[in-house]
Amino acid sequence: MTSEAFKPKALLFDVFGTVVNWRLTITQVLQTRAASTLSSPETSLPSALRLRASAVDWAGVAQEWRDAYMHFTRSHAAATGRGEDPGPFKTIDQHHHDSLRHILSAHQLDGLWTADECAEIALSWHFLLPWPDAAAGVTRLNERGLQACTLSNGNVALLEDMARFAHLPWHRIFSSEHFGVYKPAPEVYRGAVKELGVEAGECAMVAAHLADLKAARGCGLRTIYVERAQEEAWSAEEIEKAKREGWVDIWVGLEDGDEGGRGFLEVARRLATG
């Protein structure tokens, strides 16, 4: 789908799900912390709470936590788009902490972890495991003269920690926190373009979510889709429609690429040969 004129100067990367595998990491953290708490001789829990915690589907809880994030950011962006006051800006760190406490309460798991333990678990989003091609792919794109930057709803401290933890050599870190509103609000995409000092058409949004790319496209950015397992929220019919309409400039499927690498490494290959 690459056009001959597609030579971006900068790439803006979505992070959660596109660069890092949040599902694997968060599920493992919740499972490990629950097992540790339940097996600790120093932990005294009511028998009913212990039974409930033992039966929890922690992968499902991880998905609930992610769904709460999606609802939070989209509701904030929608309110801004309607000209309404969404209230004081809350960082994703604050949201992750608050939503974890709410989810635990909804599952009748209050008291499983202390307040300090919940705060520590909420910070697990700072230390998500990258997809295998992520660090090498970002490095290669930078080496080819492209400015690889984040454009994430994650707050700045979270993104900085993640960059260090996952060895992601970003040219710059852009966060919705810089613009006071969350993606998919146009202000986020336009704000990053303005900060880079380039034209919108000289930037490409890189994401594993077509909704993110569609919003970026509406702001004049080019688009690169990198499929990741279990990340796309659109239906099969919506995905096929997007392919037919052709508004995605580069489409990298799960199996696209060769021994030279998949994912971001395949993006680098196509941009070098396009």
Image (cartoon, rainbow, N blue to C red):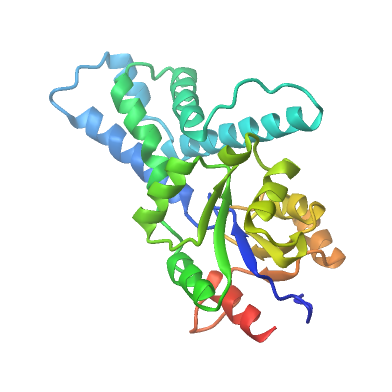
Expressed as whole percent of the image width and height from the top left, the position of residue 35 reads 27, 35
Q: Estimate the x, y position of residue 168 in percent, counting from the top left.
A: 43, 61
Residue sticking out furthest to the front: 197
Q: What residue lies at 62% left-to-right and 30% top-to-bottom?
A: 72
Q: Foreground: 148 or 239?
A: 148
**Can residue 207 be seen from the camera position used here?**
no
Residue displayed at 49% across by 77% down: 143
> Which quarter of the figure has residue 204?
bottom right
Q: Is residue 60 left or right of residue 188?
A: left
Depicted 80 relative to depicted 128: above or below: above
Return the residue found at the far left.
41
> Image check: 254 left or right of 105?
right
Would you place residue 23 above or below residue 227 in this image?
above
Indicate left or right for 13 with 80 as reference: left
Q: Is residue 109 above or below residue 265?
A: above
> Can I make out residue 199 in this image?
yes
Q: Residue 256: horizontal and vertical position, in percent?
A: 60, 76
Where the N terminus falls, by quadrant? bottom right
Give the camera-side residue of 161 and 118. 161
